[in-house]
Image: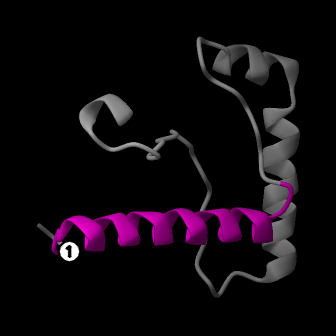
Amino acid sequence: MTESGFPGIGITHWHGLFASARVAADLVRALHRTAVDALEAPAVRDAFRYPGARVTPSASPEEFASNLRAEMNEWRALRAEIGLAPGA
Protein backbone atom coordinates (compact mmCIF):
# COMPACT_ATOMS: atom_id res chain seq x y z
CA MET A 1 0.00 0.00 0.00
CA THR A 2 2.92 2.36 0.67
CA GLU A 3 4.02 2.04 -2.95
CA SER A 4 0.50 3.01 -4.00
CA GLY A 5 0.65 6.22 -1.99
CA PHE A 6 -1.00 4.97 1.20
CA PRO A 7 1.74 4.63 3.80
CA GLY A 8 0.80 3.05 7.10
CA ILE A 9 -2.06 1.02 5.71
CA GLY A 10 -1.65 -2.70 6.03
CA ILE A 11 -4.15 -5.27 4.96
CA THR A 12 -4.56 -8.69 6.45
CA HIS A 13 -6.81 -11.47 5.33
CA TRP A 14 -8.74 -13.20 8.06
CA HIS A 15 -11.76 -15.40 8.63
CA GLY A 16 -14.19 -15.40 11.51
CA LEU A 17 -17.31 -17.09 12.75
CA PHE A 18 -20.37 -14.95 13.46
CA ALA A 19 -23.62 -15.66 15.25
CA SER A 20 -26.76 -13.74 16.06
CA ALA A 21 -26.54 -11.47 19.09
CA ARG A 22 -29.34 -13.61 20.55
CA VAL A 23 -27.09 -16.69 20.84
CA ALA A 24 -26.27 -17.37 24.49
CA ALA A 25 -22.76 -16.37 25.58
CA ASP A 26 -21.98 -19.87 26.90
CA LEU A 27 -22.83 -21.35 23.50
CA VAL A 28 -20.65 -18.76 21.74
CA ARG A 29 -17.76 -19.68 24.05
CA ALA A 30 -18.31 -23.39 23.36
CA LEU A 31 -18.33 -22.79 19.60
CA HIS A 32 -15.16 -20.69 19.92
CA ARG A 33 -13.40 -23.45 21.88
CA THR A 34 -14.45 -26.06 19.30
CA ALA A 35 -13.18 -23.90 16.44
CA VAL A 36 -9.86 -23.25 18.19
CA ASP A 37 -9.46 -26.97 18.94
CA ALA A 38 -10.03 -27.75 15.26
CA LEU A 39 -7.56 -25.08 14.12
CA GLU A 40 -4.92 -26.48 16.45
CA ALA A 41 -5.11 -29.96 14.90
CA PRO A 42 -1.90 -30.71 12.96
CA ALA A 43 -3.77 -31.71 9.79
CA VAL A 44 -5.71 -28.43 9.78
CA ARG A 45 -2.58 -26.35 10.44
CA ASP A 46 -0.84 -28.18 7.58
CA ALA A 47 -3.78 -27.47 5.26
CA PHE A 48 -3.51 -23.74 5.99
CA ARG A 49 0.26 -23.62 5.60
CA TYR A 50 1.34 -21.69 2.51
CA PRO A 51 3.54 -18.63 2.05
CA GLY A 52 2.46 -15.90 4.42
CA ALA A 53 -0.42 -17.78 6.06
CA ARG A 54 -0.69 -18.28 9.81
CA VAL A 55 -3.39 -19.82 11.94
CA THR A 56 -3.83 -17.39 14.83
CA PRO A 57 -7.18 -17.89 16.54
CA SER A 58 -8.41 -15.22 18.92
CA ALA A 59 -8.07 -15.92 22.63
CA SER A 60 -11.79 -15.41 23.19
CA PRO A 61 -14.98 -14.31 21.45
CA GLU A 62 -14.58 -10.97 23.21
CA GLU A 63 -11.08 -10.50 21.79
CA PHE A 64 -12.35 -11.28 18.29
CA ALA A 65 -15.17 -8.74 18.71
CA SER A 66 -12.71 -6.12 19.94
CA ASN A 67 -10.36 -6.74 17.01
CA LEU A 68 -13.25 -6.54 14.57
CA ARG A 69 -14.46 -3.22 16.04
CA ALA A 70 -10.93 -1.78 15.86
CA GLU A 71 -10.54 -2.79 12.21
CA MET A 72 -13.96 -1.39 11.30
CA ASN A 73 -13.01 1.91 12.95
CA GLU A 74 -9.77 2.05 10.94
CA TRP A 75 -11.64 1.56 7.66
CA ARG A 76 -14.31 4.10 8.64
CA ALA A 77 -11.59 6.66 9.38
CA LEU A 78 -9.92 5.99 6.03
CA ARG A 79 -13.26 6.26 4.24
CA ALA A 80 -13.87 9.63 5.90
CA GLU A 81 -10.34 10.83 5.16
CA ILE A 82 -10.63 10.17 1.44
CA GLY A 83 -14.27 11.26 1.22
CA LEU A 84 -15.72 7.94 0.12
CA ALA A 85 -19.46 7.75 0.70
CA PRO A 86 -20.95 4.52 2.10
CA GLY A 87 -22.25 2.33 -0.69
CA ALA A 88 -20.14 4.11 -3.30
Q: Secondary structure at mark 1?
A: loop
Q: Position of residue 70 (x, y in %)?
A: 59, 68
* Residue located farthest toward the left when viewing the structure as drawn: 88
Q: Quadrant of residue 53?
A: top right
- Which image quarter holds the N terminus? top left
- Residue 1 visible from this viewpoint: no
Question: Which residue corresponds to the image point at 75% horizontal and 23% vertical from the top-left?
Answer: 44
Q: Which residue is mark 1?
A: 86
Question: Which residue corresponds to the image point at 62% horizontal and 57% vertical from the top-left?
Answer: 17
Question: Which residue corresponds to the image point at 76% horizontal and 39% vertical from the top-left?
Answer: 56
Q: Position of residue 85 (x, y in %)?
A: 16, 74
Magenta region: which residues? 59-85
Q: Quadrant of residue 38?
A: top right
Q: Residues within 10 Å of mark 1 (few under 14, many from 20)?
A: few
Dominant secondary structure (helix, strand or loop) of the stretch shown in magenta: helix
Residue 46's place in the image compared with 12, above or below, is above
- Residue 83 visible from this viewpoint: yes
